[in-house]
Image: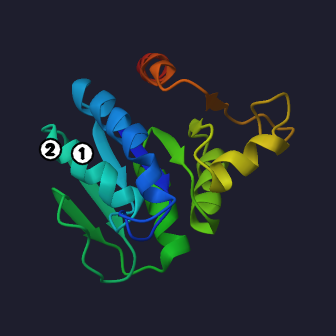
Amino acid sequence: MNIGVIGYSGNPDEKPINDLKNIITQIATIITKNNWVLFSGGRNGVMELISKETKKLGGKTVGILPWEIEGNKYLDISIKTGLDFSMRSYVLVKSVDVVISVGGEIGTGIEILGAYANEKPVILIKGTGGWTDRIQNILIDGKYLDNRRLVELYIIENIDDLETILKKIENNLKK
């Protein structure tokens, strides 16, 4: 299964990103343990941390990059889209089976909306800040972005629930 992890860009050693290192390490462990492939925007911030941790554990990492920029050094595959940040996000969303959101600013918001519009499940890690937390306040019935109810958004309060939800999504894909 291809898993997109989205979230804050920026210096991984500064707040709020460095506060998320433990959660990101746990996400990387789950992805690697299950032989899933990590997809990210391939740059710095959450993207760099998740790529670093996944790579350290022996997992596979793919970065979907804007323009022709170089990705972080933890990517197995760097896809330089030649597209701006917003358009690159749609390539990322189209390439994955599920999206995990950790914090994030407007780019993350665009990716959450893009995933939903393309009927890709989204897992929101509660308490990580940014659009991941903001968008939780507007969900219909606590799990949909609009009345079409295209696909469920899951809110994870306990990281231990993440693997269970990912396996449920994987099983649904096999049907």
Q: Check the image and report above or below for 14 versus 119.
A: below
Q: Residues within 10 Å of mark 2 (few under 14, many from 20)?
A: some
Q: For residue 146, what is the image quadrant? A: top right
Identify the image quadrant of residue 68: bottom left
Amino acid found under the numbered disc labelled 2: Lys
**Side of 2 where 127 appears, left or right:** right
The quarter holding residue 79 reads bottom left
Secondary structure of the residue carrying tag 1 is helix
In the image, residue 165 above or below residue 60: above
Q: Is residue 135 positioned above or below 42 on the image?
A: above
User: Residue 165, image x and y in percent?
Assistant: 51, 21
Secondary structure beneath dot 2 equals helix
Instruction: Tell me how far mark 1 sits from mark 2, CA to CA.
Output: 5 Å
**Residue indicated by mark 2:** 56
- 51 lies left or right of 138: left
Contact between labelled residues 2 and 1, with CB atoms less than 8 Å apart? yes
Amino acid tagged 1: Glu
The disc label shown at residue 53, or none: 1
User: Which residue is pictured at 50% across the width and 19% down the height?
Assistant: 161
Q: How many marks?
A: 2
Percent across and percent down for residue 40 are 37, 55
Where residue 119 appears, x then y in whole percent? 61, 40
Whether residue 127 can be seen here: yes
